[in-house]
Image: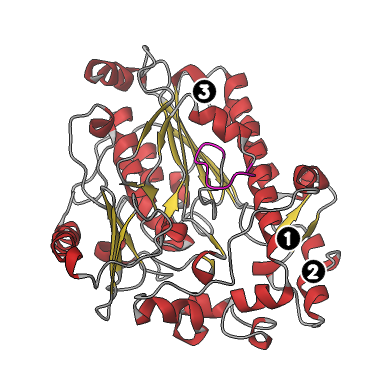
């Protein structure tokens, strides 16, 4: 493979990067929900490497995209929530590094949280279109219908119909790849990035994407359970009391939520809408999968597929009632584990050694930058936390723990079979994902877990002290 990569540097492989918003493990290839439909991602997984234990650096859009595009952990960059670029200001991100290496750089949709901060790093960039006005004007606003309230629709718990595919902003993002291929000289290497908004709420979609789920009795998380004993106060406060949440979570908690208690689960439980929301999320996954398929067909038609790396990742996971929580903003598996696929083309993997393989070693989306840099012969600036995944694929290296941070001082790592979390005020969680895959039994306070707890405390301290 080393000789193959050297040849790949001479041939300058193209890159197609696909970022998806709020996509958890509810896909066919990860099996997170038995009713999920994701045929295009499943087909990509059959010819790619699937990282079955991939994790987001932050359980929120803005900072996790910064961490991934710059290859820098948030505890070192200072970008924890939505605070600009912190210590990364003036340093090149993935787009600039590819531009400096002679690549044509084109993008569309939600790669960053908003406009690319370094506009000159792109030869072209199609900003996301505004959502269809039907969301605001023609919607039946189901949350208001269920609650009898009259305030504006709550985008976190709304769903409905959109009349036309062309009203969907992700349609235009997927379609832009045709234009990217038309604009790029066949002899110039190409870095193309597509960022899809769905399955982010609200779930407004054309009828074709609702249809497969219309008559299903949806499998839903149990939202009548209580939280497991031993959950630290900090974790309980995040999901039970919006006034204790970080400011971005509080911003989501306005009317009609205030009428229904302390959390979105209170609203969902009392309104009886969980089944419709699960249906909406799965329909949105089905829709974004179709847009990913549209992009992959464009790649095949372009004649560039034989030399194009495809990497797909999500910015974080999503709770749909698990642990009595809705949305993201936690250090639990549901909000931190993400889909991640890496397809190596025949130019880099002529024997197909890595096609359709899967790895269970925990990894981070932070490592995408170093992986692409190695495969494309690009020098990575010193001091980045990103580490190439290629040595893992070749069985030549132990991996450090996958790190997730939410706010200053609260961190969680995944290593081997374990998830260990330490909160800024000292609370701890420890889960054995082999014996307890749903993470319902916090082992941190048990005497027989002390040795494992000490080992993982040291592993977290070491991980936070590591540079690249």
Left or right: residue 58 versus residue 430 is right
* Magenta segment: 28-36
Nearer-the-camera pick, 409 or 108: 409
The number of numbered badges drawn on the structure is 3
Say which label, 2 or 3, has the lower sequence index: 2
Q: What residue sits right under mark 1 in the picture? A: 276
Marks 2/3: CA distance? 48 Å
Q: What x and y, as percent, mark residue 171?
A: 70, 43
Q: Of tags 3 and 1, which is closer to the observer?
A: 1
**Residue that lies at the very extreme toward the front in this rendered image:** 448
Q: Residue at x 24, y 43 (%)?
A: 387
Give the vertical position of 442 relative to 278 (above or below).
below
In the rendered structure, find residue 25 and report the number of the disc placed on it. Answer: none
Q: What residue sits right under mark 3 in the picture? A: 185
Whether the residues at callouts 1 and 2 have beta carbons within 8 Å, the answer is yes
Marks 3/1: CA distance? 47 Å
Say which label, 3 or 1, has the lower sequence index: 3
Left or right: residue 118 versus residue 129 is left
Q: Residue at x 24, y 37 (%)?
A: 379
Q: Of tags 2 and 3, which is closer to the observer?
A: 2
């Amino acid at each position: 493979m080393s000789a193959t990569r050297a040849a790949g540097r001479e041939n300058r492989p193209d890159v197609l990067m696909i970022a998806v918003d709020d996509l958890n493990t509810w896909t066919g290839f990860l099996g997170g929900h038995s009713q999920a439909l994701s045929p295009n991602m499943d087909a990509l997984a059959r010819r790619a490497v699937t990282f079955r234990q991939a994790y987001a650096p932050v359980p929120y859009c803005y900072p996790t995209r910064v961490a991934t595009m710059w290859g820098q952990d948030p505890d070192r960059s200072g970008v924890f929530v939505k605070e600009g670029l912190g210590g990364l200001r003036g340093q090149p991100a993935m787009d600039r590094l590819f531009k400096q290496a002679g690549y044509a750089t084109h993008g569309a949709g939600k790669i960053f949280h908003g406009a690319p901060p370094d506009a000159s790093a792109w030869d072209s960039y199609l900003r996301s279109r505004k959502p269809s006005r039907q969301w605001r004007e023609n919607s039946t606003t189901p949350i208001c219908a269920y609650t009898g309230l009259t305030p504006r629709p709550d985008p976190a718990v709304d769903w409905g119909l959109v009349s036309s595919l062309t009203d969907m902003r992700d349609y235009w993002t997927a379609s832009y790849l045709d234009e990217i291929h038309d604009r790029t000289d066949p002899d110039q290497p190409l870095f193309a990035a597509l960022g899809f908004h769905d399955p982010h709420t609200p779930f407004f979609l054309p009828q074709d994407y609702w249809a497969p789920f219309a008559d299903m009795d949806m499998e839903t998380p149990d939202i009548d359970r209580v939280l497991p004993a031993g959950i630290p106060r900090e974790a309980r406060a995040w999901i039970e009391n919006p006034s204790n949440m970080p400011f971005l979570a509080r911003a989501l908690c306005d009317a009609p939520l205030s009428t229904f208690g302390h959390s979105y689960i209170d609203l969902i439980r009392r309104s009886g809408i969980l089944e419709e929301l699960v249906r909406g999320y799965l329909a949105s996954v089905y829709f974004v999968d179709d847009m990913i398929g549209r992009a992959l067909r464009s790649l095949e038609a372009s004649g560039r597929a034989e030399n194009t790396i495809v990497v797909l990742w999500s910015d974080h996971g999503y709770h749909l009632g698990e642990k009595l929580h809705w949305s993201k903003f936690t250090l639990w598996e549901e909000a931190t584990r993400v889909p991640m696929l890496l397809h190596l083309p025949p130019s880099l993997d002529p024997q197909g050694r890595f096609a359709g393989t899967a790895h269970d070693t925990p990894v981070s989306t932070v490592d995408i930058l170093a992986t692409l840099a190695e495969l494309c012969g690009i020098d990575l600036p010193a001091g980045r936390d990103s580490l190439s995944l290629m040595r893992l694929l070749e069985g030549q290296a132990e991996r450090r723990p996958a790190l997730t941070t939410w706010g200053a001082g609260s961190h969680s790592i995944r290593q081997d079979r374990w998830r260990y979390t330490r909160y800024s005020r000292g609370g701890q969680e420890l889960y054995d994902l082999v014996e307890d895959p749903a993470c319902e039994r916090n082992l941190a306070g048990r005497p027989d877990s002390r040795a494992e707890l000490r080992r993982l405390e040291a592993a977290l301290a070491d991980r936070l002290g590591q540079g690249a």
